[in-house]
Image (cartoon, grey):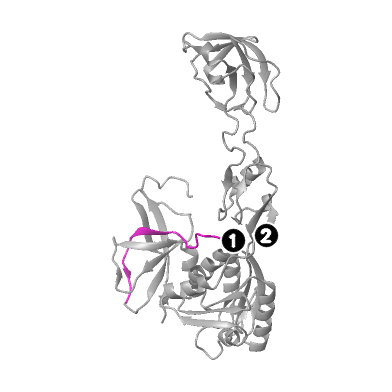
């Protein structure tokens, strides 16, 4: 058997980022930048108010208190989207709305809640203000020439907003890998209807299509391939010609009908491994031309975990990401995590909770490689090194599969909304 890290390193060395492309900025959410984005203009482009209130001279508020306000003459009203039409002189103020430009002569803003009005032409100011209070300066966010994003940055919703504020209409990014997904096996059917003896419904392909999408890639459904080497060879060659990567499930173990290995060895470069992990020990990784193919095991949980450990990090490399792995945290075991020494790392499916003292973890159900329901209820994988396991109360290393956690009943967080 080969070690997890050895196999993973070999796969990652075999893949590289896709060639960058230019896309409209509004379509770049979640994608990785392949260029530096510099500001061509200031944001904001003019000094403006951060508050609804009054634009005034800070010196005119000297000595103002709640009980002894200073009275100023109101000489104008300035909503956002309009240029100032009057200047602010000594003893004067302009009613101003958030985002409106600062009128000439004004050097501060008093929030409206610190004022009162007794008529249309006067305002009582109930507090002193300081110079430049609540004024957003020109370029307070971004100045011309500033580097706002760098190669390798992942564009989130706020990033799209920044690009819009700078009138950046398109960006150079690493595209989403287009990943073909194929299930293999004569026993598989899809859809409803009665099952004939020996048949099972295909759960791997829908699951893997969802996992590919969740990894930030474009998933392409190529259906079920039967245990026929010629048909599978034709399907894989066509997929390798059209798409950036291929993910298959089934046909990679040691049986006579495990055709994925045989076909890959004939039409591409095959590295078949028995990885020292449980579940997901068998793995076929190959390259057809320049297209990587991940041959995952057929047991549903094994297929899921194999994708997490091997395919997902490689696909993230292809998408330009530099952070490839899921986060790993320390968690307290709420019960015994017993296991036998067998030379493998075990990945137990767990439910992770977050409390005031940190993370806790418990098994989410049965741990057989066919028990997909326990995988569905898991939000983490407990990493159990070779040995006797971890006793209740001991520390576990857990790979987090999501940022959604529950809170233990009775904790100070138990009544809080779930994330």
* Residue at the image position 67 percent from the left and 88 percent from the top: 230
Mark 1 or 2, closer to the camera? 2
Residue 141, percent across and down?
A: 57, 36
Is residue 246 positioned above or below 154 on the image? below
Q: Residues within 10 Å of mark 2 (few under 14, many from 20)?
A: few
Q: Main secondary structure of the magenta part?
A: loop
Q: Nearer the viewer, residue 238 or 321?
A: 321
Mark 1 lies on a secondary structure that is loop
Q: Which residue is mark 2?
A: 21
Q: Decide: marks 1, 2 in contact (CB < 8 A)?
A: no
* Residue at the image position 62 percent from the left and 36 percent from the top: 43
**70 left or right of 192 in image:** left
Q: Quadrant of residue 348?
A: bottom left
Is residue 79 positioned above or below 59 on the image? below
Q: Which residue is mark 1?
A: 216
Q: Earlier in the sequence, mark 1 or mark 2?
A: 2
Q: Please state the extent of the stretch shown in magenta in the rendering.
A: 319-340
331 within the magenta span: yes
């Amino acid at each position: 058997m080969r070690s997890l890290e050895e196999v993973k390193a070999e796969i990652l060395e075999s893949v590289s980022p896709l060639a960058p492309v230019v896309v409209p900025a509004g379509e770049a959410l979640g994608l990785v930048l392949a260029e530096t984005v510099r500001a061509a203009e200031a944001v904001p482009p003019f000094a403006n108010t951060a508050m609804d209130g009054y634009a005034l001279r800070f010196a005119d508020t000297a000595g103002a208190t709640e009980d002894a306000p200073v009275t100023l003459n109101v000489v104008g009203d300035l909503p956002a989207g309009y240029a100032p039409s009057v200047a602010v002189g000594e003893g004067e103020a302009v009613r101003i709305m958030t985002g409106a430009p600062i009128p000439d002569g004004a050097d501060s803003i008093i929030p409206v809640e610190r004022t009162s009005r007794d008529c249309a032409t006067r305002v009582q100011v109930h507090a002193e203000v300081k110079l430049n209070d609540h004024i957003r300066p020109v370029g307070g966010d971004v100045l011309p020439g500033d580097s706002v994003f760098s190669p390798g940055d992942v564009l989130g919703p706020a990033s799209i907003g920044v690009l819009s504020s700078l009138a950046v209409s398109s960006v150079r990014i690493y595209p989403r890998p287009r990943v073909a997904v194929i299930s293999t096996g004569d026993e598989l059917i899809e859809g409803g209807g009665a099952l004939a003896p020996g048949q099972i419904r295909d759960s791997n392909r829908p699951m893997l299509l969802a996992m590919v999408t969740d990894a930030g890639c474009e998933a392409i459904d190529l259906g079920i391939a039967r245990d026929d080497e010629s048909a599978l060879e034709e399907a894989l060659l066509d997929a390798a010609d059209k798409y950036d990567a291929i993910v298959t499930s089934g046909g990679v173990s040691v049986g006579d009908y495990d055709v994925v290995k045989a076909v890959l060895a004939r039409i591409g470069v095959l590295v078949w491994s028995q990885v020292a992990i449980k579940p997901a020990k068998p793995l076929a990784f190959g390259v057809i031309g320049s297209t990587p193919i991940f041959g995952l095991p057929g047991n549903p949980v094994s297929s899921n975990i194999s994708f997490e450990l091997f395919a997902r990090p490689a696909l993230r490399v292809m998408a330009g990401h530099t952070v490839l792995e899921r986060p790993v945290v320390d968690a307290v075991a709420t019960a015994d995590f017993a296991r036998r020494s067998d030379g493998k790392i075990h990945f137990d499916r767990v439910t992770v909770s977050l409390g005031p003292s940190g993370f806790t973890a418990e098994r989410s159900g049965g741990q057989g490689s066919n028990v997909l329901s326990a995988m569905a209820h898991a939000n983490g994988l407990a990493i159990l090194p070779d040995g006797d396991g971890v006793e209740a109360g001991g520390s576990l290393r857990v790979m987090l599969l999501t940022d959604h956690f529950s809170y233990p009943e009775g904790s100070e967080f138990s009544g809080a909304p779930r994330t």
